[in-house]
Image (cartoon, rainbow, N blue to C red):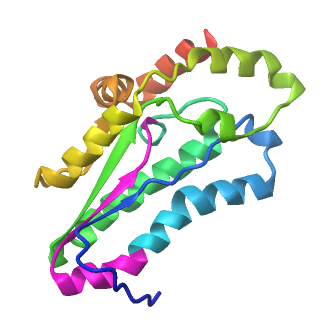
């Protein structure tokens, strides 16, 4: 992809756009899946592609990709959303290695459930067999994170000069990020199932 960047001196590119898709996988449409992938993965990917030549010529620069704690672990009824966030985490990790030879950094900021319009503007899908589960899961999600706190973590990632890839943002995200490697992914999966579904 060849795109000319001529907007002055740019040091940091932040990919922050996101869209939600919530509901059982068997009920989501292809159109909804593609919208999710286009916004959460292909959008950031194309922005990064456009800026790599600029940063390479400049011999430095930083990409920050806003992912989610949904990119660090699994949750029910958000499989497509989580998949895009896991993919963005994977893309970011690979690029942090690939672009290091040019002095270009890549970081991710992974917020917890923040007080934004994510859930009210999301595509939500219903299915009669999941009605009780949907109500139970949504009742478990508390949007407690403050946008200003996420902004502070983004600013930290942009300015701290550290060779660090992941920045969990918000109390729940930090707990999940610490808990999963502590107990392992299998135990984390079982623990999450019990917490959301009481199984």
Q: Quadrant of residue 141?
A: top right
Give the percent coordinates (x, y) of residue 170. Answer: 34, 28
Q: Is residue 136 visible?
A: yes
Is 77 rendered above or below residue 19? Answer: above
The residue at 24%/73% (across/down) is: 99
Residue extending furthest front?
A: 8
Q: Is residue 167 visible?
A: no
Count of numbered marks: 0
Is 10 rendered above or below residue 25? Answer: below
Using residue 173 as the reference point, say whether residue 27 is left or right of it. right
Toward the viewer: 89 or 50?
50
Residue extending furthest left?
A: 161
Give the percent coordinates (x, y) of residue 97. Answer: 24, 66
The residue at 75%/35% (across/down) is: 24
Using residue 134 as the reference point, say whether residue 166 is left or right of it. left
Toward the viewer: 129 or 152?
152
Give the percent coordinates (x, y) of residue 49. Answer: 41, 77
The residue at 82%/41% (across/down) is: 27
- Position of the C terminus by quadrant: top right
Toward the viewer: 58 or 127?
58
Q: Which residues are magenta?
A: 49-69
> Does the magenta-highlighted stretch encompass residue 54?
yes
The residue at 55%/43% (across/down) is: 82
């Amino acid at each position: 992809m060849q795109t000319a960047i001529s907007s002055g001196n740019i040091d940091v590119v932040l990919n922050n756009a996101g869209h939600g898709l919530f509901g059982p996988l068997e009920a989501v449409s292809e159109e909804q899946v593609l919208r999710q992938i286009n916004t959460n993965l292909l959008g950031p990917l194309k922005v990064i592609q456009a800026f790599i030549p600029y940063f390479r010529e400049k011999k430095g620069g930083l990409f920050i990709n806003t992912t989610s704690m949904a990119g660090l672990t699994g949750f029910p009824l958000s499989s497509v959303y989580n998949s895009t966030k896991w993919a963005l985490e994977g893309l970011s990790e690979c690029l942090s290695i690939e672009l290091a030879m040019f002095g270009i950094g890549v970081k991710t900021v992974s917020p917890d459930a923040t007080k934004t319009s994510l859930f009210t503007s999301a595509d939500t899908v219903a299915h009669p067999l999941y009605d009780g589960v949907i109500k139970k899961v949504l009742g478990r999600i508390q949007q407690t994170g403050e946008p200003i706190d996420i902004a502070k973590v983004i600013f930290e990632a942009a300015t701290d000069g550290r060779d660090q890839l992941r920045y969990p943002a918000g109390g729940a995200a930090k707990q999940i990020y610490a808990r999963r490697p502590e107990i392992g992914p299998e135990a984390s999966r079982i623990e999450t199932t019990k917490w959301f579904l009481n199984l």
